[in-house]
Amino acid sequence: MSLRTAQICLVSSHPEVYEPCDDSFALVDALLADRINLVEHHPVLCMEVGCGSGYVITSLALMLGQEVPGVQYIATDINPYAVEVTRKTLEAHNVHADLINTDIASGLEKRLAGLVDVMVVNPPYVPTPEDEVGREGIASAWAGGENGRAVIDKILPIADKLLSKRGWLYLVTLTANDPSQICLQMMEKGYAARIVVQRSTEEENLHIIKFWRDFDIQMDAKDIVPNKAAPVGVMDTLLSQVHRLSFRRSASSNNN
């Protein structure tokens, strides 16, 4: 039986590269949970922003495998060591992706605009002082600035430009990032959303959120919450509303 996720023993490492951890495993588990939909989706171009060790992009390539032939994979990272580690991880699993050392998708936005069918992102989401964001080396993997949103808020509009009309985005968020507000922000751009995996550890509460285009949802998003600044205390309620709304709009289809 072929492998469906990268094997930890074959994942390369470097002192300046973030190793697979709870958030990485949660993201891959979300992709596995949605695997049947991914296979039926038949993506042409899959992209990971912030590939780190290569565990996620390698797992995605393995789980689609021969069932979805002809898929092109692209992975970016601002950390040059991460690009090299990802290359070794991919090679160890006999899969391929084009690797680019860049900040998010700098230099690629025009070429990839409207072409990405699946995007996976485990962003730097840890709340830190703003001056730690974008530092060289391993710190770039977790330093997220105030509320952990500095990098996330840069990624979202870029994702909107790069995703195809049928594009899906899988995003790792932390409770401190205010995922309800992220969902509402994306809904105003015409995206439905649902939580694929929610996982609590001793240190953090993670939500892996899937977004897909549904332009009919834009007006409903404004009706649900008239104020963008949603209190953290109502996060679960808002995410539940996002979940119900997205499935009401897609009740006739199982593709999402």
Image (tube, grey):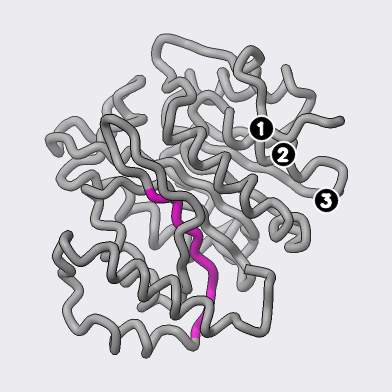
| Marks 1,3: beta carbons within 8 A | no
- Secondary structure of the residue carrying numbered label 2: helix
In the image, taking residue 247 as reference, residue 181 lies left or right, namely left
Q: Residue at x 19, y 41 (%)?
A: 145
Tell whether position 216 is magenta: no
CA distance for labels 1 and 3 = 15 Å
State the predominant SS element of the stretch in magenta. strand
The picture places residue 181, in percent across and down from the top left corner, at 26, 65
The label number, if any, that marks residue 68 in the structure image: 3
Magenta stretch in the rendered image: 207-215
Residue type at mark 1 is Thr
- Residue identifier under label 1: 58
| Marks 1,2: beta carbons within 8 A | yes
Q: Nearer the viewer, residue 160 or 33?
A: 33
Tell which residue pokes out farthest to the top in this image: 15
**Quadrant position of residue 79:** top left
The picture places residue 226, in percent across and down from the top left corner, at 20, 84
- Residue identifier under label 2: 61
